[in-house]
Protein backbone atom coordinates (compact mmCIF):
# COMPACT_ATOMS: atom_id res chain seq x y z
CA UNK A 1 0.00 0.00 0.00
CA UNK A 2 2.79 2.42 0.89
CA UNK A 3 4.42 1.96 -2.53
CA UNK A 4 1.12 2.59 -4.29
CA UNK A 5 0.58 5.75 -2.26
CA UNK A 6 4.03 7.02 -3.18
CA UNK A 7 3.39 6.38 -6.86
CA UNK A 8 0.08 8.27 -6.70
CA UNK A 9 1.35 11.27 -4.73
CA UNK A 10 4.43 13.42 -4.39
CA UNK A 11 6.78 12.85 -1.47
CA UNK A 12 4.83 13.09 1.80
CA UNK A 13 6.34 15.12 4.67
CA UNK A 14 4.65 14.88 8.10
CA UNK A 15 5.54 18.14 9.85
CA UNK A 16 3.57 17.43 13.04
CA UNK A 17 4.98 14.41 14.85
CA UNK A 18 6.28 14.20 18.41
CA UNK A 19 8.97 12.42 20.37
CA UNK A 20 9.77 11.92 24.04
CA UNK A 21 12.95 10.51 25.58
CA UNK A 22 12.98 7.09 27.22
CA UNK A 23 15.39 8.44 29.85
CA UNK A 24 15.42 11.89 31.43
CA UNK A 25 18.13 13.56 33.49
CA UNK A 26 17.48 13.45 37.23
CA UNK A 27 15.71 16.37 38.84
CA UNK A 28 18.42 18.87 39.79
CA UNK A 29 16.93 19.55 43.23
CA UNK A 30 14.08 18.49 45.48
CA UNK A 31 12.19 21.74 44.98
CA UNK A 32 11.59 20.96 41.30
CA UNK A 33 11.03 17.22 41.68
CA UNK A 34 7.22 17.47 41.79
CA UNK A 35 7.23 19.13 38.34
CA UNK A 36 10.03 17.07 36.74
CA UNK A 37 9.34 14.61 33.89
CA UNK A 38 10.46 10.99 34.08
CA UNK A 39 9.47 7.71 32.48
CA UNK A 40 7.97 4.90 34.53
CA UNK A 41 8.45 1.83 32.34
CA UNK A 42 5.99 -1.06 32.34
CA UNK A 43 8.13 -3.01 29.86
CA UNK A 44 10.99 -2.48 27.45
CA UNK A 45 8.63 -0.94 24.88
CA UNK A 46 6.02 0.97 26.88
CA UNK A 47 5.69 3.16 29.91
CA UNK A 48 4.04 6.20 31.45
CA UNK A 49 5.42 9.71 31.36
CA UNK A 50 5.21 11.03 34.90
CA UNK A 51 5.31 14.67 35.93
CA UNK A 52 6.63 14.25 39.44
CA UNK A 53 4.36 11.58 40.94
CA UNK A 54 1.45 12.32 38.57
CA UNK A 55 0.87 10.16 35.45
CA UNK A 56 0.63 12.35 32.38
CA UNK A 57 0.45 10.04 29.33
CA UNK A 58 1.04 6.41 28.39
CA UNK A 59 3.74 6.10 25.75
CA UNK A 60 5.34 3.33 23.77
CA UNK A 61 8.46 2.78 21.70
CA UNK A 62 7.12 4.92 18.86
CA UNK A 63 8.18 7.94 20.93
CA UNK A 64 11.87 7.03 20.98
CA UNK A 65 12.60 4.05 18.70
CA UNK A 66 13.74 4.84 15.14
CA UNK A 67 12.95 1.45 13.60
CA UNK A 68 9.45 1.43 15.11
CA UNK A 69 8.70 4.87 13.67
CA UNK A 70 10.06 4.04 10.24
CA UNK A 71 7.94 0.88 10.15
CA UNK A 72 4.82 3.01 10.66
CA UNK A 73 6.01 5.65 8.19
CA UNK A 74 6.50 3.04 5.47
CA UNK A 75 3.07 1.56 6.12
CA UNK A 76 1.44 5.01 5.94
CA UNK A 77 3.34 6.27 2.90
CA UNK A 78 5.24 8.96 4.83
CA UNK A 79 8.69 9.73 3.46
CA UNK A 80 9.89 12.17 6.13
CA UNK A 81 8.77 13.06 9.64
CA UNK A 82 9.62 16.39 11.23
CA UNK A 83 10.19 15.55 14.89
CA UNK A 84 9.22 17.94 17.67
CA UNK A 85 9.05 17.59 21.46
CA UNK A 86 5.98 16.35 23.27
CA UNK A 87 4.54 19.79 24.13
CA UNK A 88 4.41 19.05 27.88
CA UNK A 89 8.21 18.87 27.80
CA UNK A 90 8.55 22.52 26.77
CA UNK A 91 8.69 23.24 30.52
CA UNK A 92 7.94 26.96 30.57
CA UNK A 93 6.74 26.66 34.17
CA UNK A 94 10.21 25.72 35.44
CA UNK A 95 12.97 28.10 36.46
CA UNK A 96 15.20 29.01 33.53
CA UNK A 97 18.20 26.95 34.66
CA UNK A 98 16.04 23.85 35.22
CA UNK A 99 14.15 24.31 31.96
CA UNK A 100 17.40 24.45 30.03
CA UNK A 101 18.27 20.97 31.32
CA UNK A 102 15.05 19.59 29.82
CA UNK A 103 15.56 21.55 26.59
CA UNK A 104 19.04 20.07 26.19
CA UNK A 105 17.78 16.52 26.87
CA UNK A 106 14.99 16.81 24.32
CA UNK A 107 17.17 18.53 21.72
CA UNK A 108 19.85 15.84 22.08
CA UNK A 109 17.21 13.15 21.58
CA UNK A 110 15.78 14.79 18.45
CA UNK A 111 19.24 15.40 17.00
CA UNK A 112 20.18 11.76 17.66
CA UNK A 113 17.06 10.45 15.93
CA UNK A 114 17.68 12.69 12.92
CA UNK A 115 21.32 11.61 12.75
CA UNK A 116 20.35 7.94 12.88
CA UNK A 117 18.18 8.23 9.74
CA UNK A 118 18.83 11.59 8.05
CA UNK A 119 16.89 10.62 4.94
CA UNK A 120 13.73 10.07 6.99
CA UNK A 121 13.77 12.75 9.72
CA UNK A 122 14.14 16.47 10.30
CA UNK A 123 13.97 18.12 13.71
CA UNK A 124 12.41 21.05 15.57
CA UNK A 125 13.84 21.75 19.00
CA UNK A 126 12.90 23.38 22.28
CA UNK A 127 14.00 26.68 23.84
CA UNK A 128 13.10 28.25 27.22
CA UNK A 129 10.47 30.78 26.14
CA UNK A 130 9.87 31.89 29.75
CA UNK A 131 12.95 34.01 29.03
CA UNK A 132 12.70 35.28 25.43
CA UNK A 133 16.26 36.59 25.66
CA UNK A 134 17.60 33.17 26.70
CA UNK A 135 15.48 31.52 23.99
CA UNK A 136 16.99 33.90 21.44
CA UNK A 137 20.51 33.04 22.58
CA UNK A 138 19.77 29.33 22.27
CA UNK A 139 18.52 29.42 18.68
CA UNK A 140 22.00 29.43 17.10
CA UNK A 141 22.83 26.30 19.15
CA UNK A 142 19.77 24.52 17.77
CA UNK A 143 21.00 25.21 14.27
CA UNK A 144 24.75 24.77 14.65
CA UNK A 145 25.17 22.21 17.44
CA UNK A 146 22.02 20.13 17.04
CA UNK A 147 21.45 20.58 13.31
CA UNK A 148 17.74 21.33 13.75
CA UNK A 149 15.55 23.18 11.27
CA UNK A 150 13.59 25.24 13.74
CA UNK A 151 11.78 25.26 17.05
CA UNK A 152 8.44 24.23 18.51
CA UNK A 153 6.88 26.73 20.91
CA UNK A 154 3.66 26.76 22.93
CA UNK A 155 0.57 28.73 22.02
CA UNK A 156 1.00 30.75 25.19
CA UNK A 157 3.91 31.19 27.54
CA UNK A 158 2.62 30.99 31.09
CA UNK A 159 -0.55 32.82 30.03
CA UNK A 160 1.05 35.36 27.66
CA UNK A 161 0.01 35.18 24.01
CA UNK A 162 2.77 35.30 21.42
CA UNK A 163 1.96 38.72 19.98
CA UNK A 164 3.06 40.49 23.15
CA UNK A 165 6.15 42.66 22.77
CA UNK A 166 8.05 40.66 25.39
CA UNK A 167 8.76 38.05 22.74
CA UNK A 168 10.39 40.38 20.20
CA UNK A 169 13.95 39.25 21.09
CA UNK A 170 12.96 35.69 20.21
CA UNK A 171 11.25 36.69 16.95
CA UNK A 172 14.27 38.79 15.96
CA UNK A 173 16.66 35.88 16.55
CA UNK A 174 14.42 33.39 14.73
CA UNK A 175 14.28 35.70 11.73
CA UNK A 176 18.02 36.30 11.78
CA UNK A 177 18.79 32.56 12.00
CA UNK A 178 16.17 31.63 9.39
CA UNK A 179 14.58 29.13 11.80
CA UNK A 180 11.09 27.72 11.25
CA UNK A 181 8.69 28.18 14.18
CA UNK A 182 5.95 25.63 14.85
CA UNK A 183 3.31 26.86 17.32
CA UNK A 184 1.61 24.04 19.19
CA UNK A 185 -1.34 24.33 21.58
CA UNK A 186 -0.21 24.11 25.20
CA UNK A 187 -1.96 24.70 28.56
CA UNK A 188 -4.78 26.82 27.07
CA UNK A 189 -5.43 30.08 28.86
CA UNK A 190 -9.16 29.34 29.14
CA UNK A 191 -8.53 26.00 30.84
CA UNK A 192 -7.45 27.68 34.07
CA UNK A 193 -10.61 29.78 34.27
CA UNK A 194 -12.93 26.92 33.36
CA UNK A 195 -11.19 24.26 35.42
CA UNK A 196 -11.84 21.92 32.49
CA UNK A 197 -10.76 18.29 32.33
CA UNK A 198 -8.08 16.95 30.01
CA UNK A 199 -10.54 15.70 27.38
CA UNK A 200 -12.38 19.02 27.04
CA UNK A 201 -9.06 20.89 27.04
CA UNK A 202 -7.54 18.74 24.29
CA UNK A 203 -10.54 18.62 21.97
CA UNK A 204 -12.21 22.00 22.52
CA UNK A 205 -9.62 24.41 23.94
CA UNK A 206 -6.48 23.52 21.99
CA UNK A 207 -7.85 25.04 18.75
CA UNK A 208 -9.18 28.05 20.66
CA UNK A 209 -5.77 28.81 22.16
CA UNK A 210 -4.04 28.38 18.82
CA UNK A 211 -6.49 30.75 17.14
CA UNK A 212 -6.12 33.28 19.97
CA UNK A 213 -2.34 33.40 19.73
CA UNK A 214 -2.41 33.60 15.91
CA UNK A 215 -4.80 36.56 16.26
CA UNK A 216 -2.47 38.10 18.84
CA UNK A 217 0.45 37.87 16.41
CA UNK A 218 -1.68 39.46 13.70
CA UNK A 219 -3.14 42.28 15.77
CA UNK A 220 0.17 43.19 17.40
CA UNK A 221 2.07 43.51 14.12
CA UNK A 222 4.70 40.81 14.60
CA UNK A 223 5.02 40.29 10.84
CA UNK A 224 5.31 44.05 10.32
CA UNK A 225 8.38 44.05 12.53
CA UNK A 226 9.79 40.69 11.39
CA UNK A 227 8.55 40.10 7.84
CA UNK A 228 10.81 37.13 7.06
CA UNK A 229 9.48 34.90 9.86
CA UNK A 230 8.17 31.47 8.91
CA UNK A 231 5.50 30.63 11.49
CA UNK A 232 3.40 27.45 11.30
CA UNK A 233 0.39 26.60 13.45
CA UNK A 234 -0.74 23.20 14.66
CA UNK A 235 -4.30 21.95 14.25
CA UNK A 236 -4.88 24.02 11.13
CA UNK A 237 -4.47 27.28 13.00
CA UNK A 238 -7.34 26.41 15.32
CA UNK A 239 -10.14 28.98 15.24
CA UNK A 240 -8.22 31.52 13.15
CA UNK A 241 -10.03 30.56 9.96
CA UNK A 242 -13.40 31.40 11.52
CA UNK A 243 -12.05 34.68 12.94
CA UNK A 244 -10.23 36.16 9.96
CA UNK A 245 -13.26 38.06 8.59
CA UNK A 246 -13.83 39.73 11.94
CA UNK A 247 -10.13 40.59 12.27
CA UNK A 248 -10.20 42.04 8.77
CA UNK A 249 -13.16 44.26 9.66
CA UNK A 250 -11.40 45.52 12.78
CA UNK A 251 -8.28 46.31 10.77
CA UNK A 252 -10.31 48.31 8.22
CA UNK A 253 -12.01 50.26 11.00
CA UNK A 254 -9.00 51.01 13.20
CA UNK A 255 -5.67 50.07 11.60
CA UNK A 256 -5.75 50.53 7.82
CA UNK A 257 -5.53 54.32 8.03
CA UNK A 258 -2.26 54.08 9.97
CA UNK A 259 -0.59 52.64 6.89
CA UNK A 260 1.91 50.52 8.83
CA UNK A 261 0.05 47.27 9.38
CA UNK A 262 -0.47 44.32 7.06
CA UNK A 263 -4.11 43.34 6.62
CA UNK A 264 -5.05 40.28 8.70
CA UNK A 265 -6.02 38.32 5.60
CA UNK A 266 -2.59 38.98 4.11
CA UNK A 267 -0.87 37.93 7.32
CA UNK A 268 -2.94 34.74 7.43
CA UNK A 269 -1.77 33.93 3.90
CA UNK A 270 1.85 34.21 5.08
CA UNK A 271 1.44 31.79 7.98
CA UNK A 272 1.75 28.03 7.57
CA UNK A 273 -0.80 25.51 8.87
CA UNK A 274 -0.82 21.76 9.36
CA UNK A 275 -3.50 19.48 7.95
CA UNK A 276 -4.39 18.04 11.37
CA UNK A 277 -8.05 19.12 11.33
CA UNK A 278 -9.83 15.77 10.76
CA UNK A 279 -12.25 17.43 8.31
CA UNK A 280 -11.64 17.28 4.57
CA UNK A 281 -13.94 20.24 3.80
CA UNK A 282 -12.14 22.48 6.27
CA UNK A 283 -8.74 21.36 5.05
CA UNK A 284 -9.82 22.24 1.51
CA UNK A 285 -10.81 25.72 2.75
CA UNK A 286 -7.42 26.22 4.40
CA UNK A 287 -5.49 24.98 1.39
CA UNK A 288 -7.46 26.73 -1.37
CA UNK A 289 -8.91 29.87 0.23
CA UNK A 290 -7.32 30.97 3.52
CA UNK A 291 -3.68 30.24 2.68
CA UNK A 292 -3.03 28.58 -0.69
CA UNK A 293 0.38 26.93 -0.78
CA UNK A 294 0.87 27.29 2.98
CA UNK A 295 -0.69 24.08 4.34
CA UNK A 296 1.54 21.11 5.06
CA UNK A 297 0.70 17.59 6.17
CA UNK A 298 0.68 16.89 9.90
CA UNK A 299 -0.63 13.88 11.82
CA UNK A 300 0.11 14.35 15.56
CA UNK A 301 1.90 10.97 15.50
CA UNK A 302 2.17 8.89 17.69
CA UNK A 303 -0.73 9.92 19.90
CA UNK A 304 -4.20 8.45 20.18
CA UNK A 305 -5.94 11.14 18.14
CA UNK A 306 -3.41 11.19 15.29
CA UNK A 307 -4.64 11.37 11.70
CA UNK A 308 -4.71 7.80 10.38
CA UNK A 309 -3.51 6.93 6.89
CA UNK A 310 -2.76 10.54 5.89
CA UNK A 311 -1.63 9.69 2.36
CA UNK A 312 -4.97 8.08 1.52
CA UNK A 313 -6.92 10.86 3.27
CA UNK A 314 -5.20 13.61 1.29
CA UNK A 315 -5.41 11.69 -1.98
CA UNK A 316 -9.11 10.90 -1.56
CA UNK A 317 -9.92 14.61 -1.25
CA UNK A 318 -9.28 14.89 -5.01
CA UNK A 319 -7.77 18.36 -4.69
CA UNK A 320 -6.18 20.07 -7.71
CA UNK A 321 -2.80 18.51 -8.37
CA UNK A 322 -0.86 21.63 -7.40
CA UNK A 323 -2.67 21.94 -4.06
CA UNK A 324 -2.13 18.25 -3.30
CA UNK A 325 1.60 18.53 -4.04
CA UNK A 326 1.82 21.58 -1.83
CA UNK A 327 0.19 19.79 1.12
CA UNK A 328 2.35 16.72 0.63
CA UNK A 329 5.73 18.41 0.28
CA UNK A 330 5.79 21.91 -1.19
CA UNK A 331 4.62 23.83 1.87
CA UNK A 332 6.87 21.76 4.14
CA UNK A 333 9.81 22.66 1.92
CA UNK A 334 9.03 26.36 2.13
CA UNK A 335 8.49 26.16 5.89
CA UNK A 336 11.78 24.34 6.50
CA UNK A 337 13.68 26.17 3.74
CA UNK A 338 14.58 22.89 2.08
CA UNK A 339 13.82 21.42 -1.33
CA UNK A 340 11.99 18.07 -1.17
Image (cartoon, grey):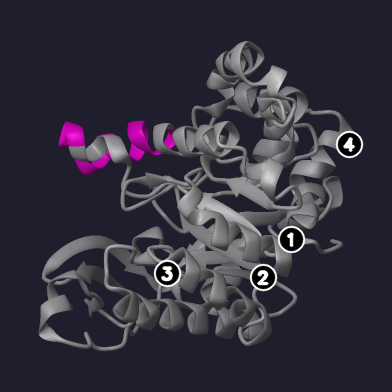
Question: Element at badge 4?
Answer: helix
Question: Element at badge 1?
Answer: helix
Rounded to the nearest angstrom, the CA distance separating label 3 from label 4 is 38 Å
**Residue at 81% in and 43% down:** 326
Residue stretch rendered in magenta on the structure = 193-207
Q: To which quarter of the image does residue 137 belong?
A: bottom right
Discs 3, 1 touching: Cβ within 8 Å: no
Rounded to the nearest angstrom, the CA distance separating label 4 from label 2 is 24 Å
Rounded to the nearest angstrom, the CA distance separating label 3 from label 2 is 21 Å
Discs 2, 1 touching: Cβ within 8 Å: yes
In the image: residue 21, left or right of residue 171: left
Which of label 3 and label 4 is nearer to you?
A: 3
Q: Nearer the viewer, residue 196 or 151?
A: 151
Residue to which mark 3 is pinned? 128
First of labels 3, 2 by sequence position: 2
Question: Element at badge 3?
Answer: loop
Badge 4: few (under 14), some or many (20 or more) residues near its Cα, within 10 Å? Answer: few
Q: Nearer the viewer, residue 119 or 240?
A: 240
Which of label 2 and label 1 is nearer to you?
A: 1
* Magenta span contains residue 202: yes
Judge whether 306 appears above or below 339 on screen.
Answer: above
**Residue at 52% in and 65% down:** 84
Amino acid sequence: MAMKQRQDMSKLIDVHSHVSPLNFPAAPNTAVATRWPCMQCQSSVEGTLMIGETPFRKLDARSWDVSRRIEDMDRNGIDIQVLSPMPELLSYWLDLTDAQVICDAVNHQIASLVASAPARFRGLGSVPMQSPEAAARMLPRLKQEFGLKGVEIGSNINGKLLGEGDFDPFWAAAEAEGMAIFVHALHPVAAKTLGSNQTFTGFALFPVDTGMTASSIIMNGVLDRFPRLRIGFSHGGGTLGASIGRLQLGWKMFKAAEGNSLAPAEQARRFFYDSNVYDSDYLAYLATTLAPGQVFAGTDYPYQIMQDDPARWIRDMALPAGIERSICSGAAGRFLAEAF
